Each structure stands twice: as structure tokens, then as C-alpha cells.
Image: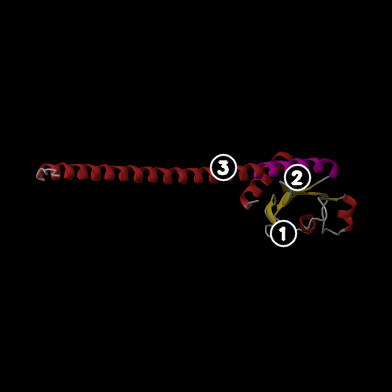
């Protein structure tokens, strides 16, 4: 996930919902932050999710209160594309409200990334086809040039034979 894409998605979803949220990369580092205050900070919950031990973490209001401000009530979920863990999406707020939002946001991010990967693949294949067509055109031009040269050489040989026949004295056959 690029930082730009992560921030755009965070701003869009937070603008629609009003909740604080983050997107983390594969190492659990925050790359998208609604508050724009924690870029580059390692989020422990996201790091645990990215380790593969779990797919989501829910922090209840009670757990947040017991943490003395170290945690906030909310939900963090893995973002997967084709089975590959590519980041996490986290949203703070009442669990019953933010959990479905997080699931939808993670699915939207995954779909967008999958689409981006497919477009990149299409561009790559189109580039290969274009290069192949260019190589084919060069080969055809070389064949055409070679056939013109062969035709010219054949004409020259034919003319030389005609001249040689005209110039050579008639030989008589004796037995």
C-alpha cells in the first residue's frame, strides 16, 4: 500500500464516518492517519496482526480504560490481497459501530489494490506486445530489404549472362 493511497482512503472514510482511523504497512508502521500525528509510528496491534498470528484485534472500552491511555477502543483488521497480508486498517470508536466499517474499508482497500495490480499487469503485457510488434516490424523490413537486394543481384546475374551469351562466339560442335 502506498502512503498516498493509505492517506486518501483514511481521509475519505473518516470524512464519511467521523471516526479516527489508521492504515499500517506490512511491518505495522502507520502510513495513513486521520489525525496526521502518528506517521511512522509502529502500531503494536497492527504488528501482531501482520505477524500472522491473528486477523483482527478488538479493543473494548474497558480494555482501553485499563490501559491508562495506551490503547483506544476500536478495531484493527488485516488487509489481504490474493491471500497476501499487505497491511492493516484500524478505526477507533464503539466496537459495535466501527467493526463493520473496518471490515468494509479493508475489503475496499484490498479490491483497489487488486485492481491496481491487474492494471499494472495489463500495462506490462501491453508493453511486451508493443515491443514484440516493433521487433516483428524490424524483421519484416529486413526481409523486404533482403528480398530487394536479392532481386537486384538476380537481375544483375541475368544481365551478365545475356551479355556473356551475346559476346561469346558461337561454338560449333564437331565430332
Prevailing secondary structure class for the magenta stretch in the rendered image: helix
Quote the CA–CA distance across marks 2 and 1. Answer: 24 Å
Left or right, 120 with respect to 137, comes to: right
Left or right, 166 with respect to 143, comes to: left
Q: Of callouts 1 and 3, which one flags the residue occurring earlier in the amino acid sequence?
A: 1
Q: Quadrant of residue 41?
A: bottom right
Q: Of callouts 2 and 1, which one flags the residue occurring earlier in the amino acid sequence?
A: 2
Q: Secondary structure at mark 2?
A: loop
Q: Of callouts 3 and 2, which one flags the residue occurring earlier in the amino acid sequence?
A: 2
Q: Secondary structure at mark 1?
A: loop
Where is residue 29? Give x, y as percent: 71, 58
Give the colour scheme of this rendering: secondary structure
Left or right, 110 with respect to 124, comes to: right
Where is residue 9? Give x, y as percent: 67, 45
Q: Which residue is mark 1?
A: 27
Q: Secondary structure at mark 3?
A: helix
- Pick the quarter of the image with the C terminus: top left
Nearest the eye: 174 or 54: 174
Magenta residues span: 95-113
Q: Which mark is residue 122?
A: 3
Where is residue 104? Give x, y as percent: 75, 40
Quote the CA–CA distance across marks 3 and 2. Answer: 36 Å
Which circle, 2 or 1, is nearer the viewer? Answer: 1
For mark 3, does the 10 Å Cα neighbourhood hold few (<14), some (14 to 19), or many (20 or more) residues?
few
Q: Which mark is residue 67?
A: none
Q: Quadrant of residue 48?
A: bottom right
Q: Name which residue lies at 28% across and 44% down.
A: 150
Which circle, 1 or 3, is nearer the viewer? Answer: 3
Q: Name which residue lies at 84% across and 45% down.
A: 95
Does the stretch in magenta take in 109?
yes
Q: Which residue is mark 2?
A: 19
Disc 1 and disc 3 in contact, CB within 8 angstroms: no
Amino acid at each position: 500500500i502506498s502512503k498516498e493511497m493509505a492517506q486518501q482512503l483514511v481521509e475519505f472514510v473518516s470524512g464519511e464516518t467521523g471516526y479516527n482511523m489508521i492504515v499500517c504497512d506490512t511491518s505495522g508502521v502507520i502510513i495513513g492517519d486521520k489525525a496526521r500525528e502518528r506517521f511512522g509510528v509502529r502500531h503494536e496491534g497492527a504488528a501482531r496482526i501482520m505477524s500472522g498470528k491473528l486477523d483482527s484485534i478488538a479493543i473494548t472500552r474497558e480494555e482501553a480504560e485499563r490501559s491508562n491511555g495506551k490503547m483506544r477502543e476500536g478495531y484493527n483488521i488485516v488487509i489481504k490481497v490474493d491471500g497476501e497480508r499487505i497491511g492493516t486498517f484500524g478505526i477507533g470508536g464503539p466496537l459495535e459501530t466501527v467493526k463493520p466499517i473496518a471490515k468494509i474499508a479493508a475489503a475496499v482497500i484490498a479490491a483497489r489494490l487488486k485492481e491496481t495490480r491487474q492494471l499494472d499487469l495489463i500495462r506490462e503485457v501491453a508493453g511486451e506486445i508493443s515491443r514484440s510488434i516493433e521487433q516483428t516490424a524490424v524483421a519484416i523490413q529486413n526481409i523486404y530489404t533482403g528480398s530487394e537486394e536479392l532481386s537486384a543481384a538476380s537481375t544483375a546475374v541475368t544481365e551478365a549472362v545475356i551479355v556473356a551469351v551475346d559476346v561469346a562466339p558461337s561454338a560449333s560442335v564437331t565430332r
